[in-house]
Image (cartoon, helix red, strand yellow):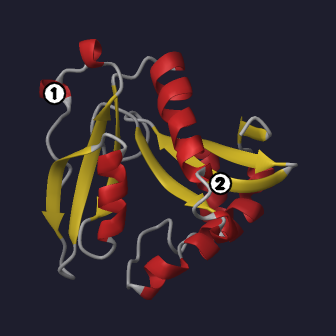
Amino acid sequence: MSDYNIRIADTSDAEEIQAIMYDAFTPLRDLGIDWPSVNASVSDVKKNIIDNTTFVLEIEGEIISTITVRYPWGGKRRISIYPFVWWFATKPSYDGQGIGSYLLKYVEETFLRDTLKAAAVTLGTSARKHPWLLDIYKKRGYEIYAEHESEDGDLGVIMRKVLIPEKFDESILGPPPF
């Protein structure tokens, strides 16, 4: 995996990132999931890159995977005081090769834990419409800390992973965002 290059995206990457997300999220669209990431336009991706920190993993200059870190001080809705990862996608032709896991681990450990000194990271997913992701995140050390039943019958969950136990304070996670 040393042939991988991980870097922070800029707006010139937006079209390539949007194409990856569109392809990767096709199964979610087919399930009726209508999250911003699932149907993001190139302009949505550019705004996401400008407002947050978007990482890309490249192989020989080709973007293969992407994930974004949203900060508690950014945006109108605060999920918690800890960073939130979202808009996570890998080219479907690379599924099962561990590339997405490699990028997520880099963001969790190298960027959030070691650079930003973030005590925890949060993310959101669906527990009913695509429950396989819930199991994947649980195996990576995430645990559910908030749930919300949506109008369409889906169960949205917010998960957290403690990165620095001695700095983590559960009492300051903030109220559930729902």
Q: Looking at the image, is 67 positioned above or below residue 133? A: above
According to the image, label 1 marks what residue? 170
Q: Where on the picture, by quarter, is residue 141?
A: top left
Instruction: Farthest residue to the top: give it.
Output: 166
On the rendered image, what quadrant is the C terminus found in? bottom left
Question: Badge 2, how many Cα within 10 Å: few under 14, some, many 20+?
Answer: many
Locate residue 41 relative to residue 71 in the image: left or right.
right
Callout 1 amino acid: Glu
Q: Secondary structure at mark 1?
A: helix
**How many labels were placed on the picture?**
2
Front residue of 94/15: it is 94
Q: Where on the picture, by quarter, is residue 13?
A: bottom right
Name which residue lies at 24% across and 20% down: 168
Q: Is residue 123 visible?
A: no
According to the image, label 2 marks what residue? 65
Callout 2 amino acid: Ser
Locate residue 115 relative to residue 72 in the image: left or right.
right
Mark sitting earlier along the chain (2/1): 2
Name which residue lies at 65% across and 54% down: 65
Q: Looking at the image, is 70 positioned above or below residue 97? A: above
On the rendered image, what quadrant is the N terminus found in? top right
Depth check, mark 2 against mark 1: the one in front is: 2
The numbered dot on residue 3 is none
Q: Is residue 151 visible?
A: yes
